[in-house]
Amino acid sequence: MDIKKLAIRILIVGVALLAAAVVWCGSSFSGDGYSTGDIFTCLYSNTQMCKQHALAYGTSYSPALFWIGVAVTVVGGLLKASLKQKSGNPSGEG
C-alpha cells in the first residue's frame, strides 16, 4: 500500500472518530438541561458533572473516544506532513 494513501486513510479514520465522539456526546447529554459549554466539557473530559449525569441517566459516553480520535488524526497528519517534506513539494503532490 502506498504510504500517502495510508496517511490519508488514517486521517479519515481519525476525523470519523472525532465526529462519532461529538455525535455520541451530544446525544448523551442533549435535552437534559445542560448548556452547550457543559456538553463540550464532557466531550473531552470526565468532570464530576459528567459522572453525575452518567449515574443519573445511565449514559455511557466516554471521552476516551474523543482522545483516540485526536491521537489518530495527529498521527495521520504527521505522517502526511512528513511525506510532503520528503518529496520536497509543499503542495504534497507527487
Image: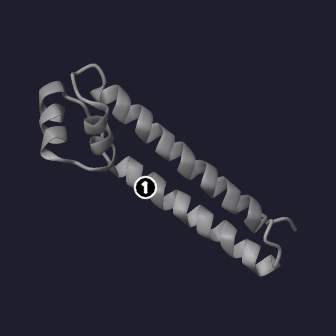
For disc 1, the marked residue is 68
Name of the residue lying farthest toward the top = 31
Q: Quadrant of residue 90?
A: bottom right
Residue closest to the eye, 15 or 58: 15
How crowded pointer 1 is (Cα within 10 Å; few <14, some 14-19, many 20+) is rated as: some
At x 64% / y 69%, what residue is drawn? Answer: 79
Quadrant containing the C terminus is bottom right
Give the side of residue 42 with respect to residue 17, left or right: left
User: Which residue is painted at 22% across and 21% down in the image?
Assistant: 32
Query: Furthest-right residue in view?
Result: 94
- The kind of residue tagged 1 is Ile
Asked if residue 32 is positioned above or below residue 20 in the image, the reply reads above
Q: State the image coordinates of residue 6 (x, y, percent, origin top left).
A: 70, 61
Q: Residue at x 61, y 55 (%)?
A: 11
Of 49 and 14, which appears nearest the observer? 49
Q: Is residue 51 left or right of residue 42?
A: left
The secondary structure type at the circle numbered 1 is helix
* Residue 3 percent across, percent down from the top left: 74, 67
Label count reads: 1
Point 29% across, 38% down: residue: 37
Give percent across and percent down for residue 88: 81, 79
Q: Is residue 51 left or right of residue 45?
A: left
Where does residue 74 sit, x and y in percent of width and height? 53, 63
Residue 85 appears left or right of 26: right
Is 58 placed above or below 16 here? above
Name the image quarter holding the N terminus.
bottom right
